[in-house]
Amino acid sequence: MRKPSRLVAMLAASSVLASNVIAVPAMAQRTEVGTTSAVAGDVEFTAAQQRNSRNLRLRDRIAWGDLIETSDRAQAQILLLDRSTFGIGARTRVRVDQYVYNPNEGRSLVATILRGAVRFFSGEEADSNNASINAPAARIGIRGTALDVLAGPEARSIARNEPAVGRGGINEDEATLVVLRGPGLQTAGGLTVGSADVTSGGVTVVLNQPGEAAFVPRVGAAPIRFNISNAGLSNVQEQLAPRVAHPGGGGGGGVVAAIIGVIVGGFILSRVLDDNDNGGAPTVDVPGCNPDTQECGTPTANTPPRPTPTPTPTPTPTPTSYPIG
């Protein structure tokens, strides 16, 4: 058999070496978007361009293309560079496709939910900030608000019990449910009004009031806009923050409480249902804040408390006599 020439062998070896040199930087380049601020239960993490997954840990750094997958009763939260947060519910697969942040130019985010439930809670609000979530049957544009997105069987099971949606024509894998959480038009504490655009089948609906929802039953179908019921809202919350979670990987009960506290958005949601039931505009009660002056906080040990003003007695008016006749 004829042996390959020395020149051919050298060219082949240099080609392999060059491919390795090129591949190493490509694998090493990771555009980071934030860190995990809470993890509870079994959560798997697969870095972009890698096949093997591992358990997600607290303070892990997340980059473009990373895939996060939660199991039953598991939850996680990602804190993005601009202080926005991604709450990831149980049985969820989500990926951050692109994230660009410059403190002077704003933030741009694109993420994909493959199935399950996520809550996006916007950080600092600015005109230059934008975010969008791609779901199986819809694209959701977000402007400064708290928003829930559910995809797959979970979206189908919740939406099909809503009178405005009905039960027919729903694809279990493609169903997409979007719920606007707030804040509303008259919220306290200087919170800005948020909204979401839900686009599918060439039709876009706008959600701009807490409790408004849009459901897309399948790819190519127009979104169905409606006000979600209290029961539906409870089911969404159960998907995002299960009542019983089993922390894993060194987490404790405090971790679960922290996730639930941030994912729910606490004070923003405290009065939405009651105000909607009463037909009024949604408001917010912020613990520790004066509802009239909007001053918040409590005195510290080094700061003396403000003196309570002594009420000034109201003088008793002197009767005035008028002549009769």
Image (spheres, helix red, strand yellow):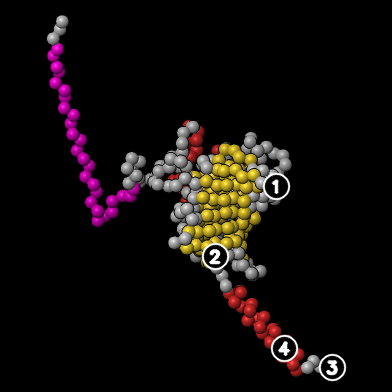
Residue, disc 4 = 11
Q: Residues within 10 Å of mark 2 (few under 14, many from 20)?
A: many
Between disc 3 and disc 2, whose residue precedes? 3
Q: Amino acid at mark 1?
A: Gly
Asked if residue 156 shows in the view, the reply is no
Q: Nearer the viewer, residue 4 or 308?
A: 4
Query: What secondary structure is marked by label 2?
Result: strand
Q: Earlier in the sequence, mark 1 or mark 4?
A: 4
Q: Residue at x 47, y 51 (%)?
A: 261
Q: Which residue is mark 2?
A: 62
Q: Please give the range of residues in magenta.
A: 296-322
How much space separates mark 2 and mark 4, taking CA atoms?
A: 39 Å
Label 1 CA crowd tier, 10 Å (few <14, some 14–19, many 20+): some
Q: CA distance from mark 4 to mark 3?
A: 18 Å
**Percent position of residue 9, x then y:** 74, 90
**Residue with the mark numbered 3:** 2
* Magenta span dominant secondary structure: loop
Query: Three-letter amino acid code at disc 4?
Result: Leu
| Residue on which the image places disc 1 | 220
Residue 172 painted magenta: no
Q: Is residue 205 left or right of residue 217?
A: left
Q: Looking at the image, is mark 4 or mark 3 nearer the viewer?
A: 4
Task: Tell me if residue 308 is in the magenta stretch.
Answer: yes
Nearer the viewer's eye, disc 2 or disc 4?
Answer: 4
